[in-house]
Image (tube, coloured by chain):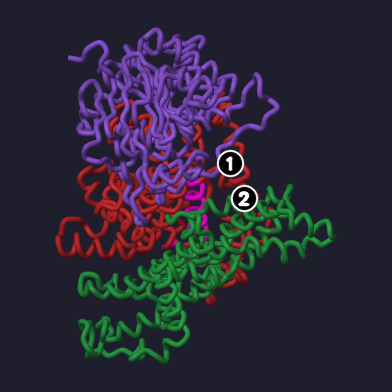
Amino acid sequence: MFFKFLLRRLMYVIPMLIVTTLIVFSLILIIPGDPALALLGDNATEEKLALLRSQLGLDQPVLIQYWNWLTNAVQGDLGRSLFTGEIVSDAVFSRLGITFQLVVASIVFSFIFGMIFAIGSVIKPNSWMDYISRFMGTIGTAIPNFWLAMLLIVVFSVNLGWLPATGFTSISDNLGGFFQSIILPAICLGAFGAAQITRQLRSSLLEVLESDYIRTAYSKGLLLWPVIWKHALRNSLLPVITTTGLLFGNMLGATVVIETVFAIPGMGQLAVNSILQRDFPMLQGVVLVMVILVLIINFVTDVLYSVLDPRIEIK
Amino acid sequence: MQFRLMFQRLFNEKLAFVSMIFLLLLLFLSLFASWIVPFDPNKQDLTKVMLPPDGTYWFGTDELGRDVFSRVLMGAQAAIQAGVVAILIPLFVGVPLGIISGYLGGIIDDIFMRIVDAILSFPAILLALGITGALGVSLWNAMIAIGIIFTPQFARLARGQTLQVRREPYVEAAKISGAGPLWIMMKHILPNILSPIIVQASFSFSLAILVEASLSFLGMGAQSPQVSWGGMLHQAYSMIFVNPYMMLFPGLAILISVLAGNFFGDGLRVAIDPKMKRS
Amino acid sequence: MRGPNEPVLEVKNLCSYIPTSRGVIKPVNNISFSIGAGEIVALVGESGSGKSVTALSIMGLNSPSIKYEKDSVISFKGENLLKMKKRQMKKIRGNEISMIFQDPMSSLNPLHPIGKQIAEPIQLHQGVSYQKAKEIVVNLLAKVGIPDPENRLNDYPHQLSGGMRQRIMIAMALACNPSLLIADEPTTALDVTIQAQILNVMRDLQKDTGISILIITHDLGVVAEMADRVLVMYCGEIVEEGDVYSLFKNPQHPYTKGLLASVPKLRGASEKLLHTIPGAVPNPLELPKGCNFSGRCSYATEKCLTEAPNLVETGKDRRAACWHIVDLQTEEVTVHA
């Protein structure tokens, strides 16, 4: 029964995959003029241009090009870098782990802070905690993450010398080093998410705390904290699951900025470099893998929501 | 919607009203900054590099001796341009598509919404980056890219609103009296779904400023000699160990502009629909 | 120690107020009453008469914006609930006094299975695990008339009908064998046929356990069905009190009389138009100077407009607050509920 449910949800993902791959592929179509010329520059020789055209399949009809690209991509062949000759899939997957660690750390950060601020805000309306939470919720959605990053680098790296300004240590190499190198990037990447979660959780908590079943919980003899913990929080977190799914995609995109600022060798940095180098197969590879990640996360949050809310029938 | 009444309510939302004044000031700056600035924002003076703020150079000077105050004022231009273009594209492309899709319904609507969903599943900045990369790096292309990534949101919003309005008696009445679909969409549906779209536009405006700044920071937006806040921060980043407070003013400019856009949007939402709670 | 006839609950001079920018509202204005052991008392009145605020005051669950006058006393087994600390009150709520609410649809947490929800007060007050509490829960479910109780424990509220959910609420309220049950409009949200079932369940359980019940309702049918004694509230004050039989037979306050006359009857006067009380409940910020009911009362005289009547003894176990009790008693009143 549950398997069937999963399968039906999965069926929805397939058309999405087709359309997204089409969009990724068509990035090369919107290059104005002759893409080969645009990629190689004006002083490229005619042989080099011809080689690139056949390498990219540009000499074939668009649909054939897409089909070839797609069938190769399904087999894990995303082509080679125009710049270094590296195999695209290898380059992307070697960086996937780093970006994934960064994004997960940021999600964890947003969740912890979002929950602390939202709960702190609702337990005593118009208290200083409430004002701080509302202030954070407002600033967090408006502050440019790279500027926040620079501010934190100045304070914690340049002045205090507590944390490294750049670089990344993988969790599998050195746990202490991982935490040191991940704190600032995770705060900057997660600030927007923390603000979003604070705002949403705050308003849904306020709504839930007004509801009849919370009054019932109090009438059983529960006090404020158990009521929040056992009855209000879970119900209020339900809509936040969907938001978290959306935040994941948002953060994945924002890694292009944060990884550049902190010099983290992840997929975001790869994307920026491949644009600067006009390395199109590489760019397509990064975009494709990121969007597939987003589709997976959306699928997972969708299923998670249905599992956690008993009112949704899994049949 | 009575616009006078709406304006009255907006006035009552003090924060939103102040924000509106600030946004108008930004607009004014973006048009006339080159006449107002005390110094030529690109004029270098290597005898006066990295001066702290004083009576002459209000925000100090950068590593090439340029006046930071003048550059911050000039930077409003790129920000406002990005905000405006990024709203106009979805308004003129996304909204009509959304209305048509919602009004016609059926298979067209299904296919259309799948495409919208698919575009929305791309991380926004990444897609903007990809489009800018393909079109060629320039502020103009960055603005088009931002406009494109905002389009599906507006289309989805317009479609949702159209679905609600489509069954209203006045639309049915117009249909019976023989009005064509184009006429109905223009005269009956569009005016009635405009309010939430305007609110969305003001939020998108501030998001566009943020995305433009990010792209310019990465070197994919405004190119020298055009001044942009994101570009200034890129410079400041390279000087972060030497002269850390260079980052202060352009960053504040972005933050305050984005805040103003958000506050204005919040106020507008309350002004349009007083029953709406403030978020 | 309490004697056998000592009341379980005694409310004395309960006076609550809400300071607002336009003046002070008094949702409950100086009321006193008591509930004896095993007694079923009905608190009757229109919405806004202060009956729910009274109930929530006993539970200590009113919103913090509602304040109490200093000399207000709600004495439960000899202790003043209004002076209790949160930690002490916690031991009373759900354990010694419990409450069921109007809307069973929204009063249960939609994300928790019902077994867990009923077990919660048992776990809380008796410090036992869910596994131990389960047995009690199954018994309770059987008592409130839920068929096949063992297999219902893992059901979620949305899988049950409104009547079933109210039974769950009753089971939950009785889980710790409290001495007082407060039922705030327990049948209002239910279908008529279900209403009778729920009232039966409550009455049977009362007989079994000897619990005292304070039932809050605007429905005189429910009062006639359930109550031993009736308190009638109007604008935050008790205007009449008496045992159900004599009060229905011989209402002493014009408001009570009006309420009884507006109940549709099966027998007799069906050809007559249904009686309605003219006018509307006054604005709580602009209460009349004299009797609160004077604006709507056909007996009102000059005195009623200027001087508020006190609640006075009018007979055996009867109290009323009206200047014209004697005039009313001379009239022939026949009411069947």
Query: Which chain does the numbered disc 2 sit on?
Result: A
Chain A display color? red
Chain C display color? purple
Answer few, some or many: residues within 10 Å of disc 2's Cα (few below 14, many 20 plus, some between 14 and 19). Answer: some
Q: Is residue A301 visible?
A: yes
Mark carried by residue A181: none
Mark carried by residue A19: 2
Amino acid on which disc 2 is placed: Val
Q: B230 left or right of A177?
A: right
User: In the image, residue B204 lies at what x, y percent?
Assistant: 50, 64
Q: Which of A211 and A74 lies nearest the eye of the viewer? A: A211
Mark carried by residue A13: 1
Tag 1, which secondary structure? helix
Q: Assign the magenta stretch its main secondary structure.
A: helix
Is tag 1's residue or tag 2's residue first in the polypeptide sequence? 1
Chain B display color? green
Magenta segment includes C334: no
Relative to C48, does residue A121 appear above or below in the rendering?
Answer: below
Q: Residue at x 21, y 86 (%)?
A: B54
Q: Range of the magenta residues?
A: A273-294
